[in-house]
Amino acid sequence: MTTYLDTSGAITYTNNLFLETSKWTPKRVLGKTIWQMFPETTEGQDQAHLIWEQLSSKSAWSGTVEKVNRLGEQYFVNMTAIPIHYQDEGLVSIVLFEMDITEDVQLRDRLEKIAYVDHETGLMSRHSLESTVNRLIANNDHFTFVYITIDHFYTLKDLHSDDEAKEIIKSFTNRMKRFFKDDSIARIGTNEFVVLTQFGSWYVEGFLDFLKMHPIYINNTALELSVSGGIVRFPEDQPTYPHLMKTALTATRETIDEGGGRIRTLSAESHKKLNRKALIDRKLQTAIIENELQVVYQPQVEVTTGKVILYEALVRWNNSELGTVSPDELIPIAEENGFIHKIGAFVLKEAAGLAAKWHAEGHDLTISVNSSVREFSNPDFKKEIMQILTKASCPPSLIQLEITEKFAFKAEEESSIFRQMNELQSEGIEFALDDFGTGYASFRYMQDLPISKIKIDKFFVQSITTNEQTKKLVEGMIQFGKSMGLYVIAEGVETKMQYSILKDLGVDAVQGYYLGLPTSVQNINLHN
């Protein structure tokens, strides 16, 4: 496979073999960047940046990388990247030569999954770790679950040869075995480990001092090696292997965000959030079955007339144990566990029924419903929407669907999503782009997708009265939207001053607590 990049990292040419492997079309792939070919994980993006930094310094790069195709599926290649530069012009372009080794990697992964021992270190494998933890849980044995990762390992790896990188892992593993000599240790990633011990955090944190006292030497030079980690207890903190792993990983990420070099328990606040998320996940199916979900409506007001022109339908969940669960909490969890389809259908049915009722009473008010990319990934979603509207006797023109920038970015790539959006627009349904300005910095999809409105995110609106730069940015967004022939809405308007500024800047409509709180249908009076 051969690919050429320009000096900004954008693809300018690929051969057919790359297109077949990556599942991109020539039209779609040209202009994509090298970073978009890598997974959207911290590890994937870090590797892409390290490769680019080396190429930018006019040095070639070679190694094995994980990439993602157009559908988000992973594949693996051996890559050689060569910068092309001339003495007078500097860096001109970059050529990538790649060999697909996905089958080899997948075979290795299958064998490693079957094996209980990590062949490089002699430690337990991930598969063995899960079996061991589940056995301890079944026996109700109390233990501490410790996730440990070597900080900045991929930067460290790039500074050393492959043999030296292996020696670093081997030496680090030996130190873990010496310190945690009576404990179970697993290697679950290149530089990721888990320790199962009967002791608490005081004991685990001692490993940091042990590493300082026993440095790793490569070519007679001591490495300044640091680690970050997360500590979780069974059964006090979490009850299952997946929850133990997720909590320990979250604690580790917190540690890394604060500079790394520590092994610690999850903060009380994060622990509370994680436990609440797990509880929402467990109770959501019952809530749907027992009709605990409800729909509330927030008005959208046209600036020139001061009249309500639309209501946005928002799902709410009031639970005796959880209290009020907001959409910001509910929707991401529903997308993870697959219940977003049922929730979306429920909200649309409620909205369509209400819009039809108002229509019969002589009030043609649009109701806006939020849609997710998971819903539109269903090739029959358009058909299901129209069936709901037909059953409710709701004119399609009274329903608006809101999508996010991430959704729009995905829709541009997926022909089935793009097709369904256009078909729904032909039926009379409008599309609004929600949270404008917070997502992907690409406006190309705004030309291609059937979007007629944009909603400036509340993040910008909330600081418009105190930050002149934000005010200028919002003004630019409004002007941009109008230049594209789009209707511009500002959401999150909470004060009279925010409203006045937005009105002066030329926004078409506003939405937020200043204009009206989300409320039940019983509290809406259309005759005011």
Image (spheres, rainbow, N blue to C red):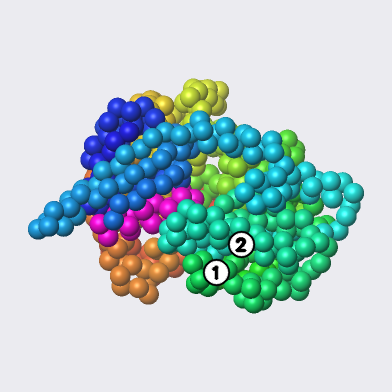
Q: Nearer the viewer, residue 286 or 192?
A: 192
Q: Residue at x 55, y 58 (%)?
A: 167
Range shown magenta: 40-58
On the image, numbered disc 2 is attached to which residue? Answer: 171
Q: Quadrant of residue 237?
A: bottom right
Q: Nearer the viewer, residue 3 or 368?
A: 3
The quarter of the picture where the N terminus appears is top left
* Residue 180 visible (yes or no): yes
Q: Are marks 2 and 1 in contact (CB under 8 Å)?
A: yes
**Residue 459 placement (x, y as % from top left):** 43, 62
Neighbours of disc 1 within 10 Å: few (<14), some (14-19), many (20+): few
Q: Amino acid at mark 1?
A: Tyr
Q: Residue at x 44, y 56 (%)?
A: 161
On the image, numbered disc 1 is attached to which residue? Answer: 217
**Residue 52 placement (x, y as % from top left):** 33, 54
* Residue 251 visible (yes or no): no
Please tell me whether the stretch drawn in magenta is mainly helix, strand or loop: helix
**Residue 470 placement (x, y as % from top left):** 33, 67
Q: Is residue 279 magenta?
A: no
Image side of residue 357 versus residue 17, left or right = right
- In the rendered view, would you say 189 is above or below 345? below
